[in-house]
Structure formats: structure tokens, C-alpha cells
Amino acid sequence: MNWEQIKGNWNEYSGKAKAHWGKLTDNDIERVKGNRDELIGKIQKAYGKTKEEAEEEVERFSKEQQRSQGDSDRPREREQQRNPRREQEERQRPGREQEQENPQRREQQKNPQRESERKEQPRKQR
């Protein structure tokens, strides 16, 4: 993920950064405001890391966010894809043919009250 995207959505990512680097205080996270160099400096100070180590961690964090962002789109893609196996199971389900042939009966099965209401009402004479 581009750091500019993280910076632009820092309110969203600040909680994730806080969870990732638990030693950083809320005040530290607030002061960073999406500034990559500021975050690197806070990590160095809190964890006693070199600048290079802190940069590597920030880069990994950025990549993790990119992967998690991509994963959040995948369930929707799966839902939208056809599932031939499930479709075949649906077609083979007992009683399926009858449901398709008689939609009125299907409606009566869904709403049994309507059926009883029909019985109670006298038929109109012509």
C-alpha cells in the first residue's frame, strides 16, 4: 500500500498502528498523523531499534495493510462467482421440480395463514 494512502486515512490506520506497535502511546500515534518519518522515529525511541530496522517494520506494516485491504475484497468476489456444484445440488434437491411446476402451491406453503383465510371466506356467487 502506498504510504500516501495510509497518511490520507490515518484515522483508520492509527488504531491498526497502535495495535501493531503496542509500546507507542496514544499521544505518539496522534502526533504521527500519518507522517512516515515521524512514525519511524517513534518506533526507534520506543523499541530501541535502528533507523533501518524501524523503516523495515513500517514497510512490512504497509504491505500487511495492502494485503488485508485486498483480502477484504475477496469475499465479495467469491459471493459473486457462480458455484456450479451448489447449483447442481439445488437442481437435484427432492421436490424441486414440483416447486417449479406449481408456484401457487409454493406460495401456500410459505404462507399457511393465507390458505386458511381462503377457506374461511365464502365464495362469491356468479
Image (cartoon, rainbow, N blue to C red):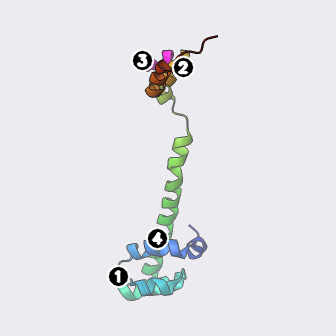
Q: Which residues are magenta?
A: 91-99
Is residue 89 shown to the viewer in this render? no
Q: Give the residue type at disc 2.
A: Gln
Q: Of marks 2 and 3, which one's residue comes earlier in the chain?
A: 3
Image depth: mark 3 or mark 1 in front = 3
From the viewer's perspective, is residue 89 above or below residue 26?
above
Q: CA distance from mark 2 to mark 3?
A: 18 Å
Q: Secondary structure at mark 2?
A: helix
Q: Nearer the viewer, residue 72 or 47?
A: 72
**Disc 2: which residue:** 104
Q: Percent position (x, y) of residue 28?
A: 44, 86
Q: Percent position (x, y) of residue 59?
A: 49, 72
Q: Of marks 4 and 3, which one's residue comes earlier in the chain?
A: 4
Q: Secondary structure at mark 3?
A: loop
Q: Give the residue type at disc 4.
A: Phe
Q: Name the residue: 44% across, 80% down.
A: 54
> Magenta segment: does it hold 98?
yes
Q: Give the residue type at disc 3.
A: Pro
**Disc 1: which residue:** 23
Is residue 113 shown to the viewer in this render? yes
Q: CA distance from mark 3 to mark 1?
A: 59 Å
Q: Of marks 1 and 2, which one's residue comes earlier in the chain?
A: 1
Q: Main secondary structure of the magenta part?
A: helix
Image depth: mark 4 or mark 1 in front = 1
Badge 1 density bin: few <14, some 14–19, many ≥20, Cα 10 Å: some
**Disc 3: which residue:** 94
Q: Which mark is residue 56?
A: none
Instruction: Please say if the residues under marks 2 and 3 sit with CB atoms less than 8 Å apart.
Output: no
